[in-house]
Each structure stands twice: as structure tokens, then as C-alpha cells.
Amino acid sequence: MKSPGLTHKIFPFLQWWPLVSRNTLKSDLLAGLTGAVIVLPQGVAFAMIAGLPPEYGLYTAMITPVIAALFGSSYHLISGPTTAISIVVFAALSEIAEPGSYEFIQLALTLAFMAGAFQLILGLARMGTLVNFVSHSVVIGFTAGAALLIMTSQMKHIFGIDIPRGASFLSSWKMILMGLPQTNFYILTVSLSTLASALLVKKFFPKLPYMLFAMFFGAIVSLILDGPVHGVTLVGELPSHLPSPSLPNLSSDVIKVLAGNAFAIGLLGLIEAVSIAKAIASHSQQHIDGNQEFIGQGLSNLVGSFFSSYPGSGSFTRSGVNFQAGAKTPIAAIFAAVFLALILLLVAPLTAYLPIPAMGGIILLVGYNLIDFHHISQVFKANRKEFGVLLVTFLGTLFLELEFAIYLGVILSLIFYLQRTSKPGIVTLSPDPDATKRQFVNIARVPLPECPQLKMIRIDGSLFFGAVDHVSSYLNELADDNPDINRLLIIASGINFLDLAGAELLVKESKRWNERGGGLYICGMKKTGRELMHKGGFWDEIGRDHFFWTKPEAIKYIYSKLSHSICESCTSKIFLECRGVTVVNRETIFQE
């Protein structure tokens, strides 16, 4: 595949622009209209979760998807406000400023700018593979914890109970339980009727925008009950205008306060976006460039911060709907933003009748749908360590600072990853005497006799500084347990990565086996490892004649160095050479 030129790297949308045609425009137009209808109630709900006025969720849904579509790599990813990031924004800012206030809005815009800057820097530094090291269990655990926090935050709107701002998870539930006798049943009726109607529409009419219908139904119930007279508060009329230019607060004091949260939001956004893009690409057969997605997400948040947008990322719901609706190119995301702008200009006055308890019912459903019960059960059954990562991240989300919960989950994932890579598999091999060709098998699985003068092992994994101690300990035990063997052959075809520490270990082992009157031999080492050994001088320290491309070549050479007096009394005869076979370039010629 031809690599893109400089112009296409700077303007990646030029790569897919030739795909745009009359047929794709028609498909993208319909997908964009569907996406705009779906994001309307979501944008309002997510902004309320983030502690922002409702219109800011819609502004974010207009600006970020356009920039992300133009500068990302996925044809179907739709960016914008998301639940997880919204709740992190609220948690990060609610203790600094009053939610909904001018200062709170300014800080949210600053978070978008800083998170976008982090994402863009990582993308330009070609760090797109970083998300591969973050366990999916971290995302599942964090999302489930965030979902419970979301549902908890809406209980005051469901029951009409007063809960102080910034209350912890446990404190909130304590106050909810204590306040149940003071439940406002008008508020409860509006919220539960909205929730019930959403469930019914979703079940019996799955193709309809169930959240939009449910909020409409909730508004009707509120009007019938004369809700505002009985304590049912309304969202209020949205401003019927497009996002206005804005300016983040980039003072040094604000940057210091928000840096940790901005990085956590940026990291979470990248994990969400790339994971969603790859999940959809598995169905669309499209290649996803992780670095380009980093750049697209970073630019979308950077640009969005100057147009009244708070931090956004890829949305699994909207991206999935976009793909299912038949979108062909990223033009669909642009159409969705344009349609949303038109809808906002037309229906903004109607939001004056939208009850906040109705929004609470919808957000309750959104939160519940975020909990991936299937994958949680699957992780529990398949891998207890991964489930431990999931559980720690989940509990950290509930009881610690949200950004710390993300870091904790990522650190645990990396620890388990390093534990696995720091202990590469090492197996002892011996040739199978019944095979027609020379085949080596693991004697732990198939008990076979071994050569009394040569030990053969295969290392499966990287030989780097983190694995040196484990491999060194294994080789020490091997030498101690086999005092009469003085030669070791390492099959290095399974060593994917070799660093200086690994090369130094091989030199150390070579000296050990030389002192025993034999030597260390290596075969099948990959090109990158051989280059490191050569450039670092390790090749000559071990001996050029101790490196081989194939096992037959190695065995043939080593056999010539063995003590033939021992060979004469040996009953194993495990090598072809032991049985009077001359080996020439992998072919065998029996001597007469």
C-alpha cells in the first residue's frame, strides 16, 4: 500500500475525498439526519451531567465531530459529548466552581483545550499505539463506575430530594435513603413515566429515537399534572443560535489546577475513540490509523474550546447508528452537525417545557445502558487478574477521584502486562526420533531422551531488561541441575525483542559455559537481535561461529565438538548425526 504524501498527512480528508459521489452523499445524508435526531436529547443530557447549560452539549455535538471527521482516520466514528467524559468534567470542576456558572463554563472550555493539546502532542509524537497497552477491563470498570455515579447524581431529580453539591457516593446514598419519606410524587411520576415510555418505545419501536419520544411524553405528563406548580422544574428555553466564539482561560494558575484532570480526560477520550473506531472497523474492513485518530481527537477538542465546546470523544452509540444507517464517508458526521444546527434553530423554544425530572429519567436509562454486564461476566469467568483490574478501577471510580481511578486502572494494566512479559516462556527441547524430518518438541509435554552433553532450550518472549532476572535465574538452575553438561543451545526464534541487558546476559552465559569446557550457541535469532549483537560487539564476544540460522546447522556444528568417547557409550542417539547420518543443507544422506 502506497504511503500518503505530505499534503495528505496534513489534510487526511484528501485521502477519502475521491470516494465521495452522488450515491455516497445520499447515504451520508440519511445517516447524518438520523444522527442529528439521536444526538439532540443526548447532547442536552450529557451537558446536564457535566454541570453545564444544556446548549453546550449541542454545541459540542456540532463542532467536535466535524473536526474529528476531517482529521481522523475512521469513516464512521462520530465524536461529541460522551457520558464518561461528562461525569469526569463535572467531578473535576464542581469543587472549584458552581456548576452552570460563567466560571464553571470557562474552566470546562479550558479543559477541552488542554485535553486536546495533550491528545495532539501524543498524536504528533506517533504514540497512537499507547492505547493498546490499556486493558479493555479498565474501560469496562471505569464506565460501570461512572454509570453508577451518573445514576446516583440523578436521584435528586427522580425523587425531588435535596442533595448538596459535591457529596460523595456513599454520602449521596445515605441522604437519598434518609430523604425518601420527603419524596415529591409529582416529580417521581414525571421521571418514572419518562423512563417507562423510553423502555417501551425502545422495545417495540427500536428504530425510533426513543429518548426524544420519551422526553416529549414526560413533558406532556408534566403539563397534565401542572408540574411547575408542584415543584417540577423545567430545563428552560435553549438559546436559538449557533455556537459563539469563546476563549479558554489559559492563566498559569488555572493550567496548574486542571493539568492532571485534563490529561486524564485526554487519555480517556483517546481510549474511547480508538476503541470505538477499531470496533466498527472490524465490521467495515477499514484500516484505522491510531496516530491519526489521536490528531483528529486533539484538534477537535482544541478547535471546539474556541467555539463553546467542552471535552468530547468518540460515541459508541452515535458511531454505531451512523454505521448501521449506511454512512459511507466522514461526510455523514458533517451532515449530522449541520442538521443538528438547523434543529436547534427551529425547536429551541420547545425546550422551555422540558422537565428536568424527565431528563433525570432519561439519564438514568443512559447510565444503566453503560454497564456492560455481558463483558463483566465474561472477564470474571475468563481471567481473574483482568477482573481484578476491572474491580479496582470500578471501586476507584466510586470512592476516589475519577482521574485517579483511570490512572490506577492503567497502572494495574501495565503492571500485569509487565509481569507477563518479564517472564518469557522457556522450554527444554529434544528431537523426536519418530519424525521423518528433524523436529524438536517440548519434553515437558512429550517425555523424550536428551543428549548427555548438550542442553537445548527455546525462549518464547522478549529478552529485555525486565525479563533478564527471570531468564538468568532459570539458566542458573539449569546449569546447577546439569553439572555434567557443558554446552547449551538457545533456540532464539521466539525472542521478539532483544535489548542491551538481554545481550549482556547472553555474553555472561557464554562465559559460564565456556568455563565449563563447552560453549553457548544461538540459532534462529531475528534480524533486529542479530544487528544489536553485531553493532554492540556482543557477536564477537560470544564468537561468530556460535551463531546459526537454523537448528540443523547448529546441531551439525555442535555435534562435531562433542566428546565422541561419550557418544560411543550413549544409548540415546537422539540426533541424526548420532545414527551415522550426514546432514547437508537440511537434506539427509545415510552413510553406507
Image (cartoon, rainbow, N blue to C red):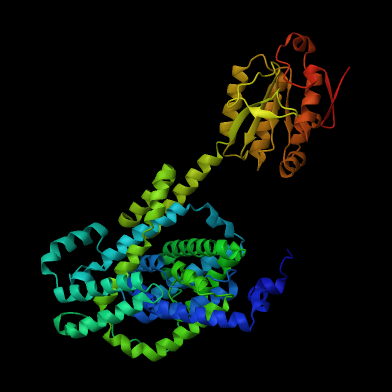
Residue 204's x, y, as percent?
Answer: 34, 72
Residue 106's x, y, as percent?
Answer: 39, 77
Query: Is residue 170 in sight in this rendering?
Result: yes
Question: Furthest residue to the left?
Answer: 181
Between 180 and 533, the one lying in front of the other is 180
Question: Furthest residue to the right?
Answer: 592
For the N terminus, the image quarter is bottom right
* Left or right placement of residue 354 versus residue 511 in this view: left
Q: Is 181 situated above or below 558? A: below
Between 83 and 77, the one lying in front of the other is 77
Q: Quadrant of residue 59?
A: bottom left
* Left or right placement of residue 305 versus residue 353 in this view: right
Residue 294's x, y, as percent?
Answer: 56, 65
Q: Is 236 situated above or below 277? A: below
Q: Quadrant of residue 278?
A: bottom right
Question: Furthest residue to the front?
Answer: 204
Give the residue displayed 58% in from the left and 34% down from the top. Answer: 425
Q: How many marks?
A: 0
Residue 237's x, y, as percent?
Answer: 31, 87
Q: Is 304 situated above or below 176? A: below
Query: Is residue 103 in sight in this rendering?
Result: no
Between 95 and 347, the one lying in front of the other is 347
For the C terminus, the image quarter is top right
Give the residue displayed 52% in from the left and 65% down from the top. Answer: 118
Q: Is 169 situated above or below 344? A: above
Give the residue displayed 62% in from the left and 63% down from the top. Answer: 287
* Left or right placement of residue 11 versus residue 59 in this view: right
